[in-house]
Amino acid sequence: MSLDAYGQLCNEVYDFTKPIGHSLGGDIQFYLQRLQSCDGRILEPMVGSGRLLIPLLEAGHVVDGVDASPDMLASCRKRLEERNLQSDLYEQKLQDLNLSGHYDAIIILTGSFLLIEKRSESIQVLKTFYDLLNRGGRLIVDLEMPANVTFDFEREWTNAYTLPNGDVITHQGRTVEADMFDQNFIALSRYDKWRDGVMIQSEHERFAMRWYGVEEFRYILQEIGFSDVILSADYEFGVMPTSSKQMFTYEAVKK
């Protein structure tokens, strides 16, 4: 399974560790502030189960969401219903994105854009975003460096999550490919769900991540046609990054 379609167990872990409104390093507050003046429609690709979507809706914005995972979208719809909120959600891969509307802002959080494995496809997705934006519309996207990439392909990592009902989900895997020249890595992992010491469900996952140099991504945006590119580090607007361990946020405008 590729990470462009989260599975059921992955989704359970995601919902458990990243509840609605849970801020990762200040990202929720940052996006609410940056979009405060946005009166038009917003698109959140890779929307997941609505961690940011729902706070934006509650703040009065009109937001559509896109995700390739039916499990993630099902969780998002459930959360919307619980809060009596409305959003148009689309099950699509970004490489095949086909929407009829246009937007004043397109946003992608926490490095999710890097899960587009092929460089050529990621650049085409950025071009699609450009076409979907109204003039003056903004693209805001988080990127990060793979700080935990390891070339020790024999070393496995394991995490365990105890859910509120007492079930335990373990997640274990290892890096199987890492290419500094091509700027990507691949990890294989599996999720196992346990109840009273008995494994009741399992799923495998292929996690591929690509990364970009700080200035490289700025040049890509400018080559596509974006202007006024502003780079921020760790959700401090306009503060340039100084470390590969920081989150980088690009904000760019379609003229």
Image (tube, helix red, strand yellow):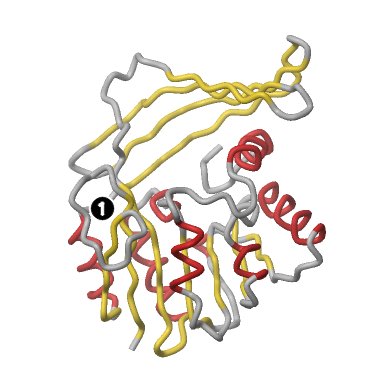
Q: Farthest residue toward the top?
A: 197
Tell me residue 180's x, y (percent).
20, 38
Q: Vertical placement of 25 versus 197: above or below?
A: below
Q: Nearer the viewer, residue 68 or 141?
A: 141
**Alpha-carbon neighbours of circle 1 within 10 Å: few (<14), some, or many (≥20)?**
some
Q: Nearer the viewer, residue 243 or 105?
A: 243
Tell me residue 114's x, y (percent).
38, 51
Left or right relative to 60: residue 216: left
Q: Quadrant of residue 175?
A: top left
Tell me residue 147's x, y (percent).
29, 37
The residue wearing badge 1 is: 212
* Label 1 element class: loop
Q: Residue at x 59, y 38 (%)?
A: 17
Q: Nearer the viewer, residue 218 or 4?
A: 218
Q: Quadrant of residue 156?
A: top left
Q: Residue at x 81, y 66 (%)?
A: 84
Q: Quadrant of the C terminus?
A: bottom left
Q: Quadrant of the N terminus?
A: top right
Q: Amino acid at mark 1?
A: Tyr
Left or right relative to 93: residue 211: left
Q: Vertical placement of 122 versus 135: above or below?
A: above
Q: Quadrant of residue 170?
A: top right
